[in-house]
Image (spheres, rainbow, N blue to C red):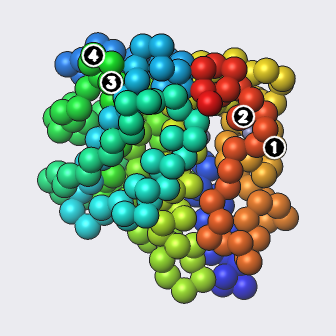
Amino acid sequence: MKKLLLFIAFVLFLFSCKKESNTNPETLPNSYSDQALGKSANDMLSDVKYTTLNIQVQYMPGYELEATTITNLTTYLGSLCNKPGGINITQTQIAANGNTFTVDSAAITERINRTAYTSGNAIAVYILVTDGFDTSLTTLGFAYRNTSICLFGKDIFTNSGGIGQVSRVALETSVLEHEFGHIMGLVNLGTPMQVFHQDTVHGNHCNNTHCLMYYAIDTHTGLGMSGLNTVPVLDSNCLNDLHANGGK
Ligand SMILES: [Zn+2]
Ligand SMILES: [Zn+2]
């Protein structure tokens, strides 16, 4: 029963991400990076404007992403984005915070610490891994601007890696790949749908319960106990949308 409860908690956490348009007051020094979520979908997927993808990860002490998570993310994005110049991910530590985190406080922390911005033929994405947690207690991460993602490192730590829990790598990878799905315009968030598959009740998510972009996975489908450490994948509708918008 404990395992089941932990499992349910995992799936509820996993896909309860939020998305916000660019309404926060923290203007970044790079106007390209100050756009609403979904605006860079085509730039991420195609090589028309940007041939290289640079990802800057900044984590608070104790919440560094696992090396395998970085490898998984590189493989995932490499399979979807046309970036012949390569995909580069750097990871550095920033000062501890320890407070609860909202979209606004993530934006403020990004404004203070982010140094990688889009320029020339390279598009840059920022990932903040906090030592705080979300006040709603239902969120492990969210994408909040066209190239900005926040992960609640403490919540991920608490909900993974223990007995009966999903592995940390699987949880980090699932949350990051889901949030990058939004950055790439899923679902109907800057990348047009080829056929209708939006779960409109839950915003910009997929209506396929098995898909990575589903807002939640119920206990009857998706990740069963035997497949606890399996990272969900994009379904054909989501893949077709990305391909039609310049992706591989
Ligand atoms: Zn989402
Ligand atoms: Zn889908």
Residue at 23 percent of width and 32 percent of height = 116
Residue at 58 percent of width and 36 percent of height = 80
- Asked if disc 1 and disc 2 are in contact, CB closer than 8 Å, the reply is yes
Q: Earlier in the sequence, mark 1 or mark 4?
A: 4
Query: Mark 1 against mark 4, which lies toward the viewer?
Result: 4
Give the number of the disc on residue 120: 4
Which one is in front, 185 or 122?
122
Quadrant in which the N terminus appears: bottom right
Q: CA distance from mark 4 to mark 2?
A: 29 Å
Q: Secondary structure at mark 1?
A: loop
Determine the residue located farthest toward the front in the rendered image: 84
- Asked if disc 3 and disc 2 are in contact, CB closer than 8 Å, the reply is no
Amino acid type shown at disc 2: Cys
Quick check: 149 above or below 192? below
Query: Mark 3 against mark 2, which lies toward the viewer?
Result: 3
Quick check: 147 above or below 13? above
Amino acid type shown at disc 3: Ala
How many residues crowd mark 4 within 10 Å: few (<14), some (14–19), many (20+)?
few
